[in-house]
Amino acid sequence: MKPLAALFLREWRLSTRVGGGALMGALFFLIVVTVIPFGVGPDLKLLARIGPAILWIGALLATLLSLDRLFQADRDDGALDLLMMGETPLELVVVVKCLAHWAATGLPLVIAAPFLAVFMNLDPPAIGATVATLLVGTPALTFLGAIGAALTVSLRRGGLLSAILILPLTTPVLIFGVSATTAAVTEPTPFLAPFLILVALVLFSLVVGAIAAAQALRLSAN
């Protein structure tokens, strides 16, 4: 466990340092959420209705924005080759790297969501549901994004291509995340059903993302 803990700490430090992508993602999330109300107008009821979707879309785009360096930096300095030759299974390495990346980039989005929800005129139940779904769902965005990052690791400036490849895969997570949030404030739609589906999607993306990303990294090394 010590090598995995050291890898987690290393990845977290790389993500949070200047140029690591964490600050860029948080600023992008802030800009998206604060600018949209100016474009929509002063209709508070409309903002409250579309607020959860705006927060989810902002979190999705901010996550994709910071995924391009998930494996690219390690490939550039040769660390990726060492990780692949190590005794630790590459799938487990991918999981640890994704968890560290989420802790540095996704968790700040979840923490900022309640404050930004004020711009959307959300009431306390909607804010709580939005934070809960983002906390559960954003790791799935990271694990699915790891597939695109691994597929484009050998390409220079492959961030845009990675986002295009992964965006369709993240659509179910977005749908059920927004559905669960909407259900929490709309009667008689149940909250638990879409929320449990969201949890299942997270577990599915963890397994599929780790296996697919590891295989893509192996192919890129050949």
Image: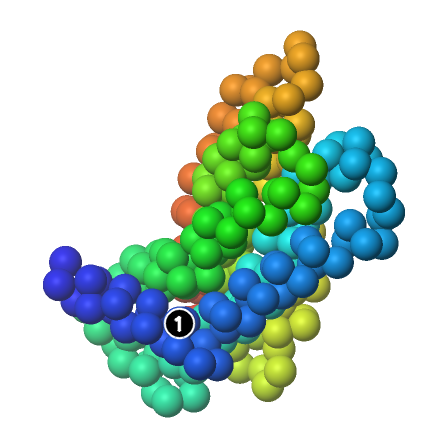
- Give the quadrant of the N terminus: bottom left
Image point (46%, 61%), residue name: 105
Give the side of residue 15 with respect to residue 169, left or right. Answer: left
Q: Nearer the viewer, residue 130 or 84?
A: 130
Q: Is residue 67 above or below residue 1?
A: below
Residue beneath disc 1: 16
Residue 170: image x %, image y %?
62, 49
- Give the quadrant of the C terminus: bottom left
Image point (62%, 59%), residue name: 30
Image point (59%, 86%), residue name: 156
Residue 78: image x %, image y %?
35, 87
Amino acid type, label 1: Thr
Image point (45%, 76%), residue name: 20
Q: Is residue 154 above or below residue 141?
A: below
Residue 171 found in image quarter:
top right
Q: Is residue 119 visible?
A: yes
